[in-house]
Image (cartoon, coloured by chain):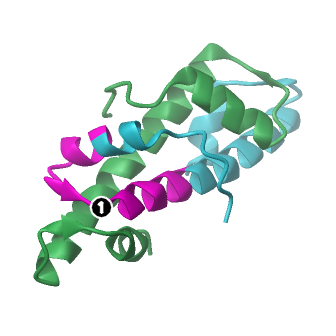
Chain colours: A green, B cyan
Amino acid sequence: MVKKGFLSHNAMDKIMREAGVLRVSDDAKVALAEVLEQKAILISTEAKKLAEHAGRKTVTEKDIHLANK
Amino acid sequence: MVKKGFLSHNAMDKIMREAGVLRVSDDAKVALAEVLEQKAILISTEAKKLAEHAGRKTVTEKDIHLANK
């Protein structure tokens, strides 16, 4: 599991409260950050391939959205 | 689409570079943040239900991991 700490636990806390979670353990925040970072790496890697496939060097919004499908 | 800005564009930039992306547009960072926030809300909502199902008020790491499956 990638664990680089790019996403703050404070951000995870805010997102979970947005989802209606009232009580959350610290390890749950760590777990959510890890899960999201792993997804982000997968999407980014796929988006890079899609940009190259389209003959571009820059990853754009449409690469991210297609990579997420 | 949820767009609350819980995840910074700087964090998205770092994650994308970690994935080997060298050039990225600003709109791609915005898109990645939106996609991740949406996933985070979905996982958090499911994790809350799983915690309640297990008779707990606090969402823990295992709820997050099960919600992500």
Q: Residue furthest top?
A: A26
Quadrant in the picture for residue A62: bottom left
Q: Residues within 10 Å of mark 1 (few under 14, many from 20)?
A: few
Q: Residue at x 72, y 40 (%)?
A: B47
**Residue type indicated by callout 1:** Ser
Mark 1 sits on what residue? B25
Numbered-mark total: 1
Q: In this rendered view, identify the residue nearer to me: A42 or A6.
A: A6
Residue A54 vs A49, above or below: the answer is below
Between residue A47 and residue A56, name the one nearer to us. Answer: A56
Q: Dividing the picture into quarters, in which one does residue B1 lie?
A: bottom right
Provide residue B49's location: percent of width, then percent of height. Answer: 82, 43
User: Which region of the structure is painted magenta?
Assistant: B14-36
Query: Going 62% across and 56% down the picture, which residue do you hit?
Result: B38
**In the figure, is residue B49 to the left or right of A28?**
right
Q: Is residue A17 above or below residue A29?
A: below
Residue at point 44%, 75% (across, down): A69
Q: Nearer the viewer, residue B39 or B1?
A: B1
* Res B50 visible: no
Q: Is residue B57 left or right of residue B44?
A: right
The secondary structure type at the circle numbered 1 is loop
